[in-house]
Amino acid sequence: MTANTGLQGITPAATGWMNQQRCAEVDPDLWFEPESKRAAIRICHTCPVIAECRAWALADPTLEGIADGLTQKQRATLRGDLPDRCKNGHIRTDQNTQYIKRSDGRRPWRRCITCDQINKQRKGLAA
């Protein structure tokens, strides 16, 4: 994130909050390498300025790599540039998504009904 000038040429020196970023303390390549994605996201989630970073990153559709704890694709989905999809690529809609409450109080888990139907069909064919 510090290697990219980002939105409208903003550099880390141009804003006070960018000087507080956790990513400034780490190798910049970490944010752009697929194999280090999880490590980068963990660092983002400990950052004191993640809210400011998210606003900045969402405003710049050209920003690549991990920023604000999200991938470029996840930011595009939040902006509405891409539809939200399950891990198998099915577009999430109210009709094909089931929300399952968790007993531990975490946010509900989203189940793709299309995936469930496909898995049931496969099991029926395999039996």
Image: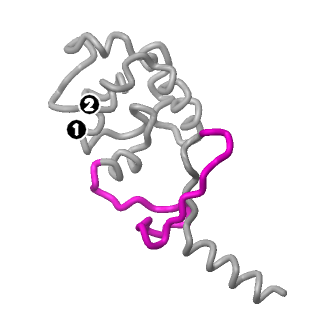
Magenta residues, dominant SS class: loop
Percent position of residue 92, x then y: 44, 65
Q: Residue at x 68, y 45 (%)?
A: 103
How many other residues sit within 10 Å of disc 2, few (<14), some (14-19) or many (≥20)? some
Residue ID for mark 1: 59
**Residue 56 placement, left or right of 124:** left
Tell me if label 1 and label 2 are in contact, CB under 8 Å: yes
| Segment tinted magenta in the rendering | 79-105
How many other residues sit within 10 Å of disc 1, few (<14), some (14-19) or many (≥20)? some
Vertical placement of residue 7 versus 89, above or below = above
Tell me the CA gap for discs 1 and 2: 5 Å
Percent position of residue 25, x then y: 47, 13
**Magenta residue check for 11:** no
Residue ID for mark 2: 56
Question: Quadrant location of residue 106?
Answer: top right
**Magenta residue check for 101:** yes
Vertical placement of residue 26 versus 33, above or below = above
**Which secondary structure lies at badge 1?**
loop
Vertical placement of residue 113 versus 38, above or below = below
Q: Amino acid at mark 1?
A: Ala
The C terminus lies in quadrant: bottom right
